[in-house]
Image: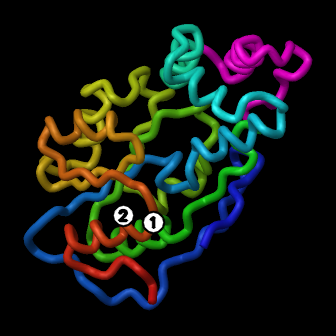
Amino acid sequence: MTRSLPSSATASLNLPHARGLSAMAPEAGPRGLLLDWGGVLTSDVFVGFQIFCKEEGIDPLRVRDLFAADPDGRQALVELETGVITEPEFELRLAALLELGPDRATSLVDRVFGSIVAEEEIFEALRIARANGIRTGLLSNSWGIDRYPHDQLPELFDAVVISGHEGVRKPDEAIYEIAIERLALPAGQIVFVDDLPGNLKPARALGMITVHHTSAAQTLDELEQHFAMPLRAN
């Protein structure tokens, strides 16, 4: 089940609270759960890109291809994710690259993410894990540092690592080392979940257990095996 993310960066997600929790974390095995945001705790970002493109009247794969293969597009994204440029500056560059014109740059990122919704099953698993002694962390490449419900992050995560705050982004090994330090656990006791295989490789190299997220059901199956506990409310 999913619910729309807020249009405002600071609006409440109104996510469900874990209920009926009684399982205890196992004494052996991983003790930390580190999650990506977009595409793991939310619906598929690339599907969202396609919806945006169709609404703007451009090729459905244009945004994906821009960030994957266009040097100017990739550079703009890297600078946004590392906090070098602001969101409005990025919007102007993205609008130009998409040939939309400066008049359509305002709130462009809002429109890009307009169809993306919260993945409530993963949020529920996160709450259950934390309630049962698993340390939880967020490791996210940011599209502007204000695009997170900052007032809710402390109740969800023991450690928060957002690229725009750190000046470094996945897949740079340094950002994983920051996450390991803030979780205060050995890398081998941390399970990291990301939807991009390229972001998992450095985590594995540092010793983390990794899960390639393709669906909520698949990720929950793998996490329940790793943590040896149920992570679904019912």
The amino acid type found where label 1 is placed reads Ala
Q: Give the range drawn in magenta.
A: 84-109
Badge number at residue 219: 2
The amino acid type found where label 2 is placed reads Thr
Which coloring applies here? rainbow
Residue where numbered disc 1 is placed: 216
* The residue positioned farthest toward the left in the image shown: 28
Please name the residue shown 14% across and 37% down the image: 206
Element carrying mark 1: helix
* 176 versus 7 height, above or below: above
Could you classify mark 1 by the number of other residues whose Cα lies within 10 Å: few (under 14), some (14-19), or many (20 or more)? some
Badge number at residue 192: none
Please name the residue shown 10% across and 74% down the image: 27
Residue placed most toward the observer, 47 or 157:
47
* The residue positioned farthest toward the top in the image shown: 72
* 49 versus 3 height, above or below: above
Where residue 178 sits in the image (x, y, percent)?
28, 34
Residue placed most toward the observer, 66 or 37:
66
Where residue 108 sits in the image (x, y, percent)?
78, 29
Where residue 1 sits in the image (x, y, percent)?
60, 73
* 166 versus 212 height, above or below: above
Where residue 66 sits in the image (x, y, percent)?
59, 21
In the visual, does 121 lie left or right of 8?
left
Please name the residue shown 29% across and 50% down the image: 192
What secondary structure is the stretch in magenta mostly built from? helix
